[in-house]
């Protein structure tokens, strides 16, 4: 999962350490091209995980640990001064966000071996629904279109679960784990959005990913999951590819282009991850879910589109869509 970017409400000036002015036509074309690369990167995440011969918790650990290794030179050299300036509260919230992110991975990754990539990806990306509900619990009102999209997406979730229940109880359990992963992701982005008001994406994600890697390593050791012993060369290649494609190229490019394209365009584009992952899984893994699953996936996507288009401010942020 990414350290989500800072965004501002439409019509307001960018603020904070990641702020930038509006791009020109050439920069926008470049951003659109990078956005296509980013969506392709995050779309291969679920199929890669499903095909990697390693425990789910270990895959999640290495994904974050390898990303930390790549980020370290930048964070410790270019961002060292800001890391030192972070307050205890900022460090604490960043670390707590990392714990919740570890929970997200710990729930979602096992689901990919229990249900189809298409169902799992659709259910885990329902994060905007849970974010909307959490914000409402905190007293923030949402437009009617957001609630209509939430209701529609819930109908799609019920349809997917109903289809998988007729397939097997294991598939239904996988659906439940993926849904739990989406709920955990909502907590992750809400915590992160508070930290990123005063801390750059690089510093925030460095503390967050580091905490996530430590928590997942502890979970691997407690569960007895191998974190490297006996892995084949092909497994290590897939772990590296997952880190590069989904974590660094996918998430990092999304963090970059949102500054120029805006939250609405970026967050709507992220919804293409679900059909993209389903198509890759069908071609590469030969996964073909029951035909009835596909209309249900379209219902979920339609609901999420309404949430994005109807949201203003926090709900429309791409961070709340949480590409996987």
Image: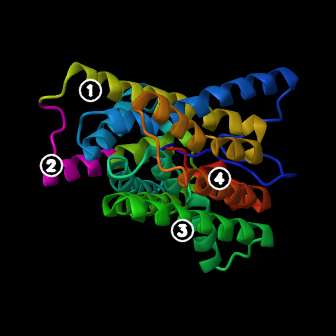
User: Taking 32 as reference, is 188 above or below it?
Assistant: below
- Image quadrant where residue 261 sits: top right
Spot occupied by residue 54 in the image (x, y as percentages of width and height): 23, 37
Q: Considering the numbered disc 4 on the image, is that residue within a helix, a strand or a loop?
A: helix
Spot occupied by residue 88 in the image (x, y as percentages of width and height): 43, 58
Of marks 3 and 2, the one in the foreground: 3
Magenta residues span: 213-229
Spot occupied by residue 297 in the image (x, y as percentages of width and height): 59, 53
Relative placement, left or right, of 281 versus 6 is left
Give the mark nearer the N terminus: 1 vs 2: 2
The label shown at residue 235 is 1
The label shown at residue 221 is 2
What residue is drawn where x is 71% and y is 46%? 268
Give the mark nearer the N terminus: 3 vs 2: 3
Give the mark nearer the N terminus: 4 vs 3: 3
Overall secondary structure of the magenta stretch?
A: helix
Give the mark nearer the N terminus: 4 vs 1: 1
């Amino acid at each position: 999962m990414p350290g989500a970017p800072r965004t501002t409400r439409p019509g307001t000036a960018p603020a904070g350490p990641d702020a930038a002015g509006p791009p020109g036509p050439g920069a926008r074309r470049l951003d659109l091209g990078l956005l296509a690369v980013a969506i392709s990167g995050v779309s291969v995440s679920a199929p890669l995980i499903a095909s990697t011969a390693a425990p789910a918790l270990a895959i999640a650990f290495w994904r974050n640990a390898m990303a930390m290794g790549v980020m370290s030179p930048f964070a410790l050299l270019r961002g060292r001064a800001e890391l030192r300036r972070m307050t205890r509260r900022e460090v604490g919230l960043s670390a707590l966000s990392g714990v919740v992110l570890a929970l997200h991975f710990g729930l979602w990754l096992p689901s990919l071996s229990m249900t189809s990539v298409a169902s799992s990806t659709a259910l885990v990306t329902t994060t905007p629904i849970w974010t909307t509900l959490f914000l409402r619990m905190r007293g923030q009102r949402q437009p009617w279109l957001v609630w209509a999209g939430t209701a529609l997406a819930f109908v799609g979730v019920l349809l997917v679960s109903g289809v998988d229940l007729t397939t097997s109880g294991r598939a239904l359990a996988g659906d439940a784990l993926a849904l739990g992963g989406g709920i955990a992701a909502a907590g992750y982005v809400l915590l992160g959005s508070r930290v990123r008001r005063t801390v750059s994406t690089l510093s925030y994600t460095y503390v967050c990913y580091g905490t996530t890697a430590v928590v997942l390593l502890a979970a691997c050791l407690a569960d007895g999951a191998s974190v490297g012993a006996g892995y084949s060369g092909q497994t290590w290649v897939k772990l590296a590819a997952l880190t590069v494609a989904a974590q660094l190229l996918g998430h990092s490019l999304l963090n970059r282009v949102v500054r120029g394209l805006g939250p609405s365009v970026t967050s709507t584009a992220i919804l293409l991850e679900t059909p993209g992952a389903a198509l890759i899984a069908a071609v590469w893994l030969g996964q073909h879910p029951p035909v009835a699953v596909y209309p249900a996936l379209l219902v979920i996507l339609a609901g999420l589109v309404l949430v994005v288009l109807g949201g203003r401010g926090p709900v429309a942020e791409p961070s709340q869509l949480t590409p996987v």
